[in-house]
Image (spheres, rainbow, N blue to C red):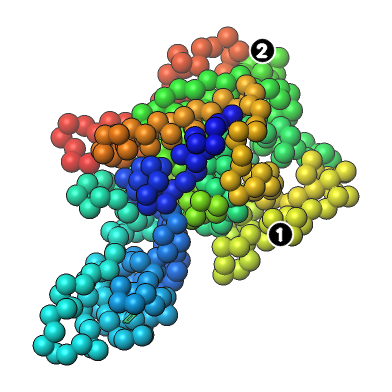
Amino acid sequence: MLSHEKNALLTQCGPAAPMGRFMRSFWIPAMTAAQVPSADEPPVRLTLLSERLVVFRDTQGRVGVMEENCPHRGASLFFGRNEEGGLRCVYHGWKFDVEGNCLEMPAEPATSRMCQNVKTRAYPARIAGALLWIYMGDAQTVPDLPAFGFIGQPDDHLYASRWHQECNYAQAMEGELDSAHVSFLHQELNKTNPDPQALTGKYFQEDTAPLWKILPNGAGFMACNGRSVDGDKRYWRLNQFLLPFFTMIPPRPGDAQLVRMWVPMTDERSWVICVSWRPDGPLNEKELTAWRNGENSHRKVVPGTTLPVERLDNDYLIDRQEQKTVSFTGIKGIRAQDAMVTETAGPIADRSREHLGSSDVAVVAMRRALMEGATQCADSGQPHPAAANAWLYSVRAVQAVLPGDQSLEAADEFLAPARATPPSPTSTH
Ligand code: FES
Ligand SMILES: [Fe+2]
C-alpha cells in the first residue's frame, strides 16, 4: 500500500516532478531505430515523459529530437519541412538544426540578429542497439549509454519492437517483476507445454507460491523466485530490475535474451520497448517471424502503428468460450494478457487501496528503489550512481533447476552471468 503522496512520487514523470527529474538523469530509449525517419524525410511525433517532441534526421543523417512547438509562436514542427540541414516551421519559415540552433528567420529583415539569439529545446540523441536513445537531463552531465549486452551487437543479432500501454509505467512494469502471476494469468487449460520451464509448462503449476529473495545488483536488484519442483529441487528464476525502468526475464536454454523497457509517455500512458538479442550469432528466421507477428516476447500491433490489436477498448478480444476450455483468460497472447491486468487497474492505480502479500515482494522493492532514487536525486541535486556507472547494466537474467538444499547466494556459477562486470582499470568505458 502507498499513500496518495507516495503514489504521486512514484508515478509522476513530468519535467518538474522528482521522478521525472530522476529519470532525466538516465539515457531514455524512445523508439526503435527503424522508426526513426531517414535523412530529409518528414519528422515523426514523440511524446516522452510528458514532453511533446519531434524526431527527424537531417541531410547528413544526424538525428534531431526537439520540442514539437516552434519557439516563435508555437506552431507544431511536426508539420514542418525537413529541408537541407534542418527542420523549417511552415508558419513563418524559421529553420532549426538538430541541436536546436535557429538557422534562418526569413520573415525578419536581413539586418536582424534575432536568429542568433533564439534556440529551441533539443536533446542529445544516439542510435545504438536497434534503438533511439535520448538524454533529457542536465547537459553538463551526459552519461555513457548503459552497457547492456545488446548494445554494439551486429544488426542481425537484434530485434526491437515498441507498442503503447494505457497505464502508468510503474504499474505496467509491476506485471513484469511479479513472477507469481505466471501460474495463473498465462495458464493453458487444454494442454501443458512439454517444456517444464515454459511459462505454460508444469513447473509453474507444481508450485504456485514461489519463495522470494531480493539480491541487489548495483543499479536495482535481482528478483529471485524459486519454485519447489520435481520432488526435492528448486526452479530458480532471477529477473533483473535496473533503474529506472528496465527489466529482464530469463530466457529458456537456447532462447534469445530479452530486455524490456517501460518508458513513461505521459503519466497515464507508457511505451513498452522490447529488444530480443543473441550474443553468439544471428537471430533465426523462426523466432523473427513469430516476433514480427507479435507472438511470444513481442506484441501484436495494428501494422504500421504502436497500437496493440488486443487492447483495452475492445476488451482484448476476449473469447469467453476459450476462457472455459483453452486458457485461463480467454485472451490470446501473453503480452495482451499482461496488458489486460495492468491496464484495467486504471491509468494510475490507486495504491492506497491495495492489499499486498508475500508474492508482491519484488513489486515493493521496485517501488522503493525508484522512490529512494528520486528523493536522493532531488535532495542532492546529483544524478543517481546507476546513471553514472554504465557497466552496472551488463547483467543477464538467468534461470536453473538447483538442488533444493542449495543456497542461492552460494551458487556462484549460476549467478556469474547475472552479475555485472566492472570495467578494468585500463578501460575507458
Ligand atoms: S510559429 Fe514557427 S515560424 Fe512562426
Ligand atoms: Fe506475465
* Residue at screen point 45% across, 61% down: 47
Pointer 2 residue:
232
- Is disc 2's CB within 8 Å of ligand 2? no
- Camera-side residue of 5 and 408: 5
Quick one: SS at disc 1?
helix
Residue 125 is left or right of residue 260, and the answer is left
* Residue at screen point 25% across, 50% down: 138
From this view, report whether residue 360 is shown above or below residue 330: above
From this view, report whether residue 404 is shown above or below residue 331: above
Image quadrant of ligand 1 equals: bottom left
Query: Where in the figure is residue 305, as x and y percent of width and height?
Result: 57, 67
Identify the amino acid type marked 1: Asp
CA gap between label 1 and label 2 equals 46 Å
Quick one: SS at disc 2?
loop
* Residue at screen point 37% across, 34% down: 375
From this view, report whether residue 88 is shown above or below residue 132: below
Query: Where in the figure is residue 89, as x and y percent of width and height?
Result: 34, 81
Q: Which dot, 1 or 2, sits closer to the camera?
A: 1
Determine which of the numbered discs, if any, sits on residue 313 in the image. Answer: 1
- Is disc 1's CB within 8 Å of ligand 2? no
Q: Residue furthest top?
A: 405
Q: Quadrant of residue 148?
A: top left
Identify the amino acid type marked 2: Asp
- Camera-side residue of 119 and 427: 119
